[in-house]
Image (cartoon, rainbow, N blue to C red):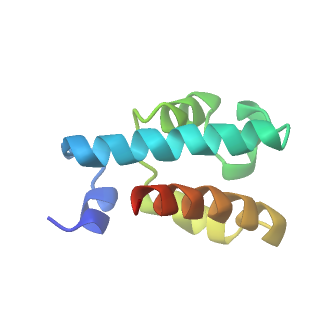
Amino acid sequence: MHFLSRLEHPCMAISASERAFFERLGARMAELRKSQDITQVEMAKTLGVSQQTINSYEVGRRRIPEQQIERIQRLPRAQQRFVMQVIDTVLAQQGR
């Protein structure tokens, strides 16, 4: 199954490597959020989700769904850059 189709259907099981990817993505997201002095509550408000959802992303319990990506696209440029920096960093680490 294609990776993006799994993002579109978040209830589907994921492989161990996918779980590891989302755990690393979440950890990096948390690290960058903290380095910018942004709380989970602030990030959640910006993205239009609950603080619990942000926490679940950061610990790798939940995948970021396609709807979240669409919301990110509607953020101001500075916030988009922050989110993209998180993603780019994790992808670079994945490629090592």
Q: Is residue 93 above or below residue 43?
A: below
What residue lies at 55% left-to-right and 37% top-to-bottom? 27
Which of 65/33 is in front? 33
Q: Quadrant of residue 23?
A: top left
What residue lies at 25% left-to-right and 46% top-to-bottom? 17
Which of 23/1 is in front? 23
Q: Quadrant of the C terminus?
A: bottom left
Residue 44 position in % (x across, y down): 68, 40
What residue lies at 72% left-to-right and 66% top-to-bottom? 80
Q: Does residue 30 appear left or right of residue 18 in this picture?
A: right
Q: Quadrant of the N terminus?
A: bottom left
| Number of numbered discs on residues | 0
Q: Does residue 71 appear left or right of residue 34 in this picture?
A: left
What residue lies at 19% left-to-right and 45% top-to-bottom? 15
Q: Quadrant of residue 88?
A: bottom right
Residue 78 position in % (x across, y down): 83, 66
Q: Is residue 62 above or below residue 86?
A: above
Q: Does residue 2 appear left or right of residue 47 in this picture?
A: left
Residue 12 position in % (x across, y down): 20, 46
Q: Quadrant of residue 62?
A: top left
Q: Is residue 54 above or below residue 95?
A: above
Q: Does residue 1 appear left or right of residue 86 in this picture?
A: left
Farthest front residue?
96
Residue 6 position in % (x across, y down): 26, 58
Which of 40/22 is in front? 22
